[in-house]
Image (cartoon, rainbow, N blue to C red):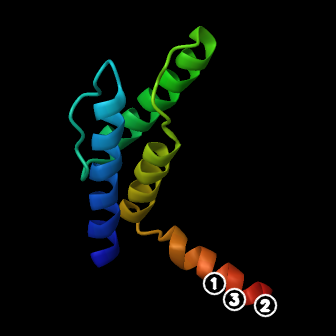
Amino acid sequence: MERIREAQEHLKNEFEIYNNAAAKKLPPIAIDDVASLEVMLECVTRRESLGQAKKLGLPPSSKLKAAIADTLLLLDNFDIKVSKDKGAAESK
C-alpha cells in the first residue's frame, strides 16, 4: 500500500511539472481510476507524437508517462521495482 501512495505522489508531482510547462493544460487527473489513467497516458503520448510532427515546443513527457505506467501497474497489483530487483538478483 505504501508503494502505491508513493507512486501516486510521484505521479501528482510529474503531472504538475508537465502541466506547468505546457501551453495547453491537461485535464485534472484521477490517480485512483485505471480508465482515466489509461486515457491520460494515451493523450500524453498522442500529444508528444503530434508535437514532434509539428515541431511544437512541448515539455518532455517521458517522466510523466513512466509515472502513469508505474501507477497503473501498481493498481493492477504488479510492482515493477520488485520485479526488476528480483531480475537483478537472479542475474548475479
The quarter of the picture where residue 22 lies is: top left
Q: Which residue is mark 1?
A: 86
Q: Residue at x 58, y 9 (%)?
A: 54
State the residue at coordinates (60%, 19%): 52
Near mark 2 (Cα within 10 A), the count class, few <14, some 14-19 or many ≥20, is: few
Residue 61 - label: none
Q: Is residue 67 left or right of residue 82?
A: left
Q: Are marks 1 and 3 in contact (CB under 8 Å)?
A: yes
Amino acid type assigned to the residue bearing label 2 in the image? Lys
Q: Give the residue pinned by disc 2.
A: 92
Give the Cα separation between the discs numbered 2 and 1. Answer: 10 Å
SS for callout 2: loop
Q: Are marks 3 and 2 in contact (CB under 8 Å)?
A: yes
Task: Identify which residue is drawn at 30% across, 39% down.
Answer: 36
| Quarter of the image where the C terminus is located | bottom right
Looking at this view, is 54 or 65 the one in front? Answer: 54
Residue linked to disc 3: 89
Indicate whether 55 appears above or below 62: above
Where is residue 68 shown, x and y percent of the image?
A: 41, 49
Give the secondary structure at mark 3. Answer: helix
